[in-house]
Amino acid sequence: PQYDSRLKVAIAMNLAIIFFEIIGFMLALSALGWSSFVYYTQDSNALALIAAVLFICSAMWQAQGRKNKKFDKFVRMLKYTAVVSVTITFVVVITILSWTTNYSLWQLLTQHSMLYHHTICPILCIVSFLWCEQYNYQKKHAWAGISFTLIYAAVTIFLNLIGELVGPYPFLKIYSQPWWASVLWCTIILGGAYGLARLLRWGQKKIQS
């Protein structure tokens, strides 16, 4: 198999992502059980775990000369979506949850499973994507990058509307705030998500060029 240096680093970083994601999920599941998946944090990290596994498979097959363009494109788009999603997790923790919950920023970044799902794994995903994972993403791909976030938002807002779910985040508690506040939060978070998707794509292109 022919592995260039950048691909070797990418595989190593994705192996690290898998390792830390598993630790994070062991802690999250032991504390909250399967209900932990009501949170965007766990959902986005699950996506990152799956994307990392598939990325390694794709990279190894590519190094062995067994190229499959359709599968490779699917994996790269999934990886992009996962990186955008965990970046949103990281940014929302710092900019919103740190002052709208009872947790301090330090606790949110270092306590229990949050150390892995709020901090270590998102940072590893971002660094690997920007420096090591090569793919010619286009501007239009930003919509694919936020697709997971749009689905999560649609599902959780609907469940809040029909009373099957409360939150789980303060800005999703639509019956505890004026309607315009919910609209404002959606605009800020989804608009910010799209901006992050564009920024990550631009950053990768600049860093790797």
Image: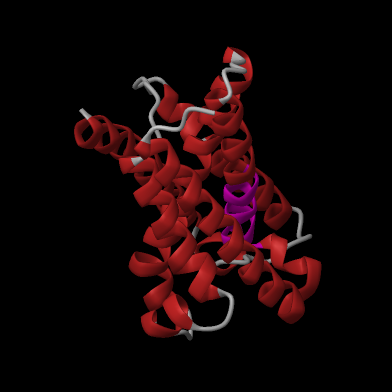
Residue 43 image position (x, y, % from top left): 64, 54
Between 51 and 161, the one nearer to me in the picture: 51
Query: Residue at point 76% right, 54% down?
Result: 162
Q: Can residue 180 be seen in the rendering of this structure?
A: no
Q: Where is residue 152 shown, x and y percent of the image?
A: 62, 47
Q: Please tell me which residue is depicted at 43% across the width and 24% down the height of the picture.
A: 141
Magenta segment boundaries in residue numbering = 39-50
Question: Residue 191: where, in percent of width, then height?
Answer: 37, 41
Residue 113 falls in image quadrant: bottom right
**Which quarter of the rendered picture does the C terminus lie within?**
top left
Image height check: is 98 above or below 50?
A: below
Above or below, comparing residue 173 to residue 102 in the picture = above
The structure residue drawn at horizontal position 28% and vertical position 39%, both measured from the top left corner, is: 199
Q: Does the magenta run of residues contain 41?
A: yes
Q: Residue furthest front?
A: 1
**Residue 200 spot, x, y in % from top left:** 32, 39
